Every structure is written in structure tokens, then in C-alpha cells.
Image: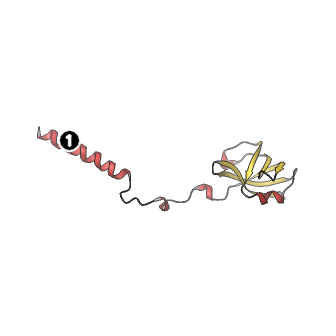
């Protein structure tokens, strides 16, 4: 019978120990200890052609090749732009080099330049 008490005590200690580790006792935010997300790094460049520019909505339609960092095949689609001023540097029909990434859940052009 004494053996059963020892096993019960060990099981309780393990259960409470796991619970104590599940949440920080001090309430300290430990997120600063982790490396920044990969999305904060510059996205690789892709080739595209400007099909339409909507300065009012801050969007551009691009016919583009594969976008490796987003695992996206080539297609034509509408993108948000991170900074609407980028749309002043391009015009419909331009061949461009651009970078796109997920920003707040939306696929967004983070850089765009006319191709040379």
C-alpha cells in the first residue's frame, strides 16, 4: 500500500510541475529572446510586367513569373503595394523586377523597379 502512495505522489508532482512550466510565473514577455521572423528580411526579386495600376487603391496588377519565397507559380494577379509612392515609378506595360511578401496576411509588393 505504501508503494501506491509513492506512485500517486510522484504522479501529482509531475502533473503540477508540468503545469508550473506551462506559463511564466513572472508574467514576463519572452518574445524578445527569439530571432526576428524571416519575413523581415528582404524578399528575393521576381520578374513581371505591369498590366494595370490603381493608385487610388494602392494596388498593381502584375503578370509575373514564379515567386519563390511565396511558393507561387507564375500568373497574373492584383497585389497591394507597401508604399503607394512606388506606383509613381512604373507605368502599364513596363517590365519590372519586384519583391513580394506576406504583410499582415496579404500578399504585398514590398519593392518594385523598372527592369533594365
Kind of element beneath mark 1? helix
Residue at x 63%, y 51% (from the top left corner): 104
Can you give x and y, in whole percent of width and height, for residue 72 in the image?
69, 43
Q: Is 114 located above or below residue 12 in the figure? A: below
Q: Is residue 41 left or right of residue 25?
A: right
Residue that extends furthest to the front in the rendered view of this protein: 56
Numbered label tally: 1
Name the residue located 25 percent from the left edge and 48 percent from the top edge.
Answer: 13
| Residue 7 in which image quadrant | top left
Near-viewer residue (51 or 83):
83
Above or below, comparing residue 96 to residue 7 in the picture: below
The extreme left residue here reads 1
Provide residue 93's location: percent of width, then percent of height: 88, 50
39 lies left or right of 109: left
Q: What residue is disc 1 on? A: 8
Describe the colour scheme in one phrase. Answer: secondary structure
Residue 103 coordinates in the image, percent (x, y): 65, 52
Quarter of the image with the C terminus is bottom right
Quarter holding the N terminus is top left
Q: Residue at x 38, y 52 (%)?
A: 23
Q: Quadrant of residue 27?
A: bottom left
For disc 1, the neighbor class at 10 Å (few under 14, some 14 to 19, many from 20) is: few
Along the horizontal axis of the image, is 91 left or right of 111? right
Q: Nearer the viewer, residue 63 or 102?
A: 102
Amino acid at each position: 500500500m505504501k508503494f501506491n502512495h509513492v506512485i500517486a505522489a510522484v504522479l501529482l508532482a509531475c502533473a503540477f510541475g508540468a503545469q508550473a512550466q506551462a506559463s511564466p510565473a513572472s508574467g514576463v514577455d519572452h518574445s524578445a529572446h527569439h530571432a526576428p521572423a524571416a519575413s523581415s528580411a528582404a524578399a528575393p526579386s521576381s520578374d513581371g510586367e505591369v498590366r494595370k495600376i490603381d493608385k487610388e487603391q494602392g494596388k498593381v496588377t502584375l503578370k509575373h513569373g514564379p515567386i519563390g519565397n511565396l511558393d507561387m507559380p507564375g500568373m497574373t494577379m492584383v497585389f497591394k503595394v507597401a508604399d503607394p509612392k512606388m506606383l509613381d515609378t512604373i507605368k502599364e506595360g513596363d517590365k519590372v523586377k519586384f519583391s513580394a511578401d506576406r504583410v499582415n496576411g496579404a500578399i504585398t509588393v514590398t519593392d518594385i523597379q523598372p527592369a533594365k
